[in-house]
Image (tube, rainbow, N blue to C red):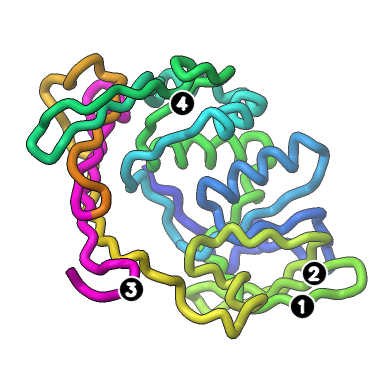
Amino acid sequence: MSVKSDSCSPDITLSSTTIVDVLIAGAGVGGLVAALCLHRCGFTVRVHEKFKVLDKTGYGLNLQPSSVKILYENGFEDELDKLGVRTGHVNYYTSTGQFIYREPRGLNAGYKWPMYSVHRGHFHELLLHRVRSELGETSVVLDQRLVNFRVKDDYVEVDLSNSEGCSTTEKGRVLIGADGVHSAVRKILYSDEGNSLWNGTILWRGVSPVEEMYLDGKTMVSMGDPNRGSIFMFPVNEKFVNWTCHIRVTNPLGKFI
């Protein structure tokens, strides 16, 4: 099910005189988890997302034990067990399929919390539903692109614009930029930073259905040479596998190989 915005609607655009404790730019995984944690600590939070629609699209995602600890503290243990897979090991193979070694993950590696492999779209939908349930339906506002912000003595003014040409200015005690690798917040803070550095790697990735799960259904597989080309895959539930094909096309000096 898609979640759509209601641009310029007065019921989701609060008065610019209202000051919330924390404004978050970006309703991705990081922004939504931050909103839940801050709300749990007693802060008022509102999240602004530039996209008009949030679909259940995406790919596989690994949740490491340190992040699972935070999710458990927010009451996601049962949901994660239903949504994904408790990853137990990763197997390493050569490019011709020869087994190299097996390495434990999560609880098998001695952590207090498991490692999960999930479908990002389903996980994101779970987080969005929880945020709107606990913080209110108006806590996440879609189709709100951050244009600029100004730091005042005791608050931050944030200018937002949507696809219908409507603009608004919101105020918060703190602004968190959780708006991705092409962050508008970061670009404003570090306008002379330039483009992100490329490590010379090209990736193809996706999630595919399988008729029968490989091995024990809880094992990640890495096959090939990570310095040249490899494939990496892991189950995200009982019926789907995430795969990533990775090829390095330049050396550390930026020359194509």
Residue 152 vs 93, above or below: the answer is below
Residue 225 vs 155, above or below: the answer is above
Say whether disc 3 or disc 4 marks the residue closer to the N-terminus.
Answer: 4
Residue 121 horizontal/vertical position (percent): 38, 42
Q: CA distance from mark 1 to mark 3?
A: 39 Å
**Considering the numbered disc 4 on the image, is that residue within a helix, a strand or a loop?**
strand
Residue range corresponding to the magenta coloring:
228-257
* Label at residue 150: 1
| Quadrant holding the C terminus | bottom left
Q: CA distance from mark 2 to mark 3?
A: 41 Å
Badge 4: residue crowd in 10 Å (few <14, some 14–19, many ≥20): many
**Considering the numbered disc 1 on the image, is that residue within a helix, a strand or a loop?**
strand
Badge 3: residue crowd in 10 Å (few <14, some 14–19, many ≥20): few
Residue 243 horizontal/vertical position (percent): 23, 41
Q: Which residue is mark 2?
A: 156
Q: Quadrant of residue 147?
A: bottom right
Q: Which residue is mark 4?
A: 115
Q: Quadrant of residue 253?
A: bottom left
* Label at residue 253: 3
Badge 1: residue crowd in 10 Å (few <14, some 14–19, many ≥20): few
Which residue sits at x=33%, y=47%? 57
